[in-house]
Image (cartoon, helix red, strand yellow):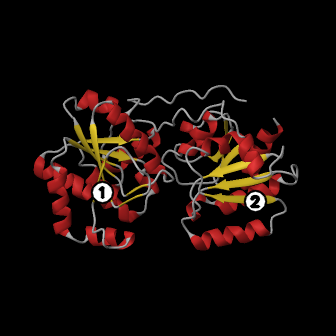
Amino acid sequence: MMSSQPELRGDYERISDLLLDRYPNVRRVGVLISTLDEAEGVASVVIPQLAELNEANISTSVYLFDYVTEVDSDVVSLGNDALSSRMRRAEYFVNPLRIGRSALELKDEDLLIVHQPILTIPAVLTQYLFDTPVVFVNHRSPVDEGAFLHPLHELASLSDTVVSVSKYSRDGFANRYGVTGPVIYNTVGGSYNENVDGSAVRRKHSLGDDPVILYVGRISPEKNIEKLISVYEYVLREFPDAVLLAVGRTDDRAYKERLDALAATSNGTVIMTGRVSEEELPQYYAAADVYATCSTLEGFNLTIVEAEQCGTPTVAFDIGPHAEVQSYGRTVEPRNLPAFADAVLELLRS
């Protein structure tokens, strides 16, 4: 078992600290996010932030298109609820009247916190028309984003404050748009700790004492899970009883079918659990011997911190913020699968 995860220190520990320092008179905050679902990376950061702001006696309203997870905040729909989720978003951003109506609603807030570039459109409009300050939270470095997002990041750079979730994301934004701001690292709750018992998860999946390699995240092509399966096949040569456990919801059905086909031909056991609850997730980290992610596009990667908080060492490619947020594990040259496998093996042997 590893020693306790050291605290990442940014310019502020929490978003409420930033508000109390720079906006001490703020009592009402509007938070803009596309979908409030605890299984999504951005939402998993926003949900505890809402609780934190409420505890600081700052009332919160969430402006969004869809929500799955219930929160103790007012929820305001941005789109036409009669439409499907995808159509609701499309209709909103081609409808200037709807964006204008949003600005009229948003002006009643003392401050707006925006978590996705697309939602800077109504937020910055509100700032321009009504002097409502906007805090844009930069979750990814612009150098990693597609060109179509650059105009939105340009718009985000007009925000009163740009907060980044890592130094890597901050520097990428500053280099591209000439705007810098404080770093506030993403944090995980107290349910992620070294005292979590993973035995129930091992029983649930009949893992016994077998070595377990864990991945947590969306089942989506940019996460490169097929590469992790390739790494796993290499690991099986030394640890034939090892199990690969992949936890997360499916975002791309065709990609999931491709992974299922790879799993079916594996020399070992690949278990894809689907989505699990936030209450159960720490037990999965505790049940694992190594946490591994082959993702090559991240602005922070909260799962590395979650795993290490639970005492599980991590392996990741040396990209973006990984070396910055990782404390107990290995980073390896991007896309070097043999080196990645060697790092997993080294941790399994220890």
Task: Rate crowding at label 2 as few (under 14), some (14 to 19) or many (20 or more) other CA atoms within 10 Å.
Answer: many
Give me the residue at 19% from left, 31% from top. 25
Q: Is residue 91 above or below residue 22?
A: below
User: Residue 51: x, y in percent?
Assistant: 38, 38
Q: Give the side of residue 15 with respect to residue 38, left or right.
A: left
Task: Rate crowding at label 1 as few (under 14), some (14 to 19) or many (20 or more) other CA atoms within 10 Å.
Answer: many
Q: Which residue is mark 2?
A: 270
Judge depth for marks 2 and 1 and give the one in front: 2
User: Residue 207: x, y in percent?
Assistant: 80, 49
Residue at disc 2, secondary structure: strand
User: Residue 257: x, y in percent?
Assistant: 66, 72
User: How far separated are the C-alphas under marks 2 and 1?
Assistant: 38 Å
Give me the residue at 80% from left, 44% from top. 345
Which residue extends farthest left? 129
Please say whether residue 12 is visible from this viewpoint.
yes
Residue nearest the viewer, comparing 310 with 141:
310
Q: Is residue 134 above or below residue 256?
A: above
User: Residue 281: x, y in percent?
Assistant: 61, 45
Give me the residue at 28% from left, 65% from top. 79
- Quadrant placement of the C terminus: top right
> Disc 2 or 1, which lies upstream in sequence?
1
Residue nearest the viewer, comparing 96 with 238:
96
Specify the label residue 282 is tagged with: none
Circles 2 and 1: CB atoms closer than 8 Å = no
Residue at disc 1, secondary structure: helix
As shown in the figure, which amino acid type bears the numbered disc 2?
Val
As shown in the figure, which amino acid type bears the numbered disc 1?
Leu
Occupied quadrant, residue 315: top right
- Quadrant placement of the N terminus: top right
Please say whether residue 289 is visible from this viewpoint.
no
Q: Is residue 149 above or below residue 61?
A: below
Q: Which residue is mark 1?
A: 119
